[in-house]
Amino acid sequence: MNKDAMQTSNIDLFSDETLRNPNPVFAELREMAPVVWMDKYKVWAITRYDDVRDALSNTEVFSSTKVAFNDVMNEALKGTSLATDPPEHAQLRKTLLAPLTPIALKKIQDDITKKAETMIAGVVEKGSFDAIEDVARAFPLEVVTDMLGVQGEAREKVLLWGDAAFNVLGPMNQRAAENLPLAGELFEFCANVKPEELTEGSLGRGIFEAADRGEIARESCGPIIHQYIAAGLESTIAAIGNTLKHLAANPDQYALLVNDPSLVRSAFNESLRLEGPLGLIGRLVMQDVVIGDTKIPAGSQVALMLASANRDPRKFENPDQYLVTRNASAQLSFGSGVHSCAGQNLARIEANAILSAFVRRIKSFKAGEPEIKLANMTRSLNSLPVLSVETV
């Protein structure tokens, strides 16, 4: 046996200390071994790029039935596309993806672009603003609620619901326990919402119309709406906010975007690599598997360390640098294989629209200190004050 065999760590991946500065922790685990036993939560952490990518794609060995790190949520998520394996997963995902294909989204792309232009024009006029509250959070909220047709009190609560939906995927610590009631409200809303409560012509109304046509089961409508809110809001907010943070911290890279706005998509991919919205995700091992010199027994839970994999120097040169010209398309923040993020096409359209509008209007900007948001699963900010802007 060599040093890669049965490495153990007592690090708490979900402590405030780790969440404030996770990258040194991930680097330590990654260099320790490709697989590390995390004793506090009794899970195996898979730390390196190739192994994480392979596990994401191998659904026969790594099942999504334990995507969360607590039993309550794994039970609640049963039957959803997030926590279902092939072949049952195929039909659920097909239904979920239908409105999110590039062709389907092209119909709303112009509207998203106009929303972005209007929003950035407004913050530029203010001169100083919060890049999270006024841009990264406000934009996906407007897009997703309009798209789903959510109205009234529910529209005011979807941000809290989306945030809670991720926090409860962690271990049952204080953060998860405090968010369970909100996560329950989201489940209740989705289970009971009626088509007439959603805007006519909206995607949300269209889901019920698909059920009326017999294309999907009526009982699938609520879970599909749940996934749009739970998975499609907080992760996009985090991804856009983290991109703005890295652009603020790297003015030379932002200048490259101003000079060549076609780099916006590349800059977003690089941000997903350097600091994606989701740090890790759970899987259940269905049969004994060996990674490196370590055997992971069937029945074990693993943590696929997405954020660690995305900074693996075995895959990415100078992995801790933010380089908008880097080809970071191999990043794993949106997953890989059959469980790759269903909403990533929409997230990319939103990010491209708002970041392109930002770059076209703002030649340079100065930002204050970002305020980190402590969350079990997502990596994001509470605040990023923009102190001044120089317009184009």
Image (spheres, rainbow, N blue to C red):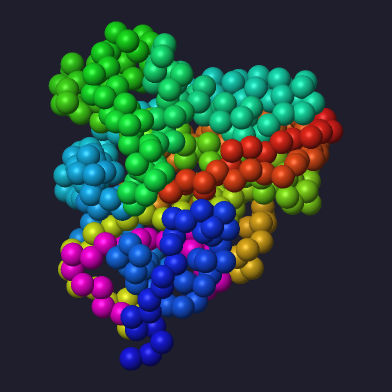
Q: Where 56 falls versus 159 (above or below)?
A: below
In the current view of this chain or complex, which residue is farthest to the bottom? Answer: 1
| Residue 242, horizontal then vertical, whole percent | 60, 45
Residue 239 seen from this side: no
Q: How many labels does the image show?
A: 0
Residue at figure coordinates x 79%, y 38% from the top left: 365
| Residue 3, horizontal then vertical, whole percent | 41, 87
Residue 160 seen from this side: yes
Give the camera-side residue of 58 and 73.
73
| Residue 61, horizontal then vertical, whole percent | 22, 64
Left or right: 110, with 292 as reference point: right
Instruction: Specify the quadrant that holds the C terminus.
Output: top right
Residue 214: image quadrant is: top left
Q: Give, as a single range, the part of the protein colored magenta.
A: 294-315
Left or right: 363, with 329 as reference point: right
Q: Where 6 falls versus 118 (above or below)?
A: below
Instruction: Specify the quadrant that holds the N terminus.
Output: bottom left
Give the camera-side residue of 17 and 190.
17
Residue at figure coordinates x 44%, y 67% from the top left: 11
Q: Does the magenta stretch include residue 141?
A: no
Residue at figure coordinates x 53%, y 69% from the top left: 27
Give the camera-side residue of 243 and 260.
243
| Residue 303, horizontal then vertical, whole percent | 35, 61
Residue at figure coordinates x 18%, y 68% from the top left: 298
Q: Is residue 310 magenta?
A: yes
Residue 147: image quadrant is: top left
Residue 319: image quadrant is: bottom right
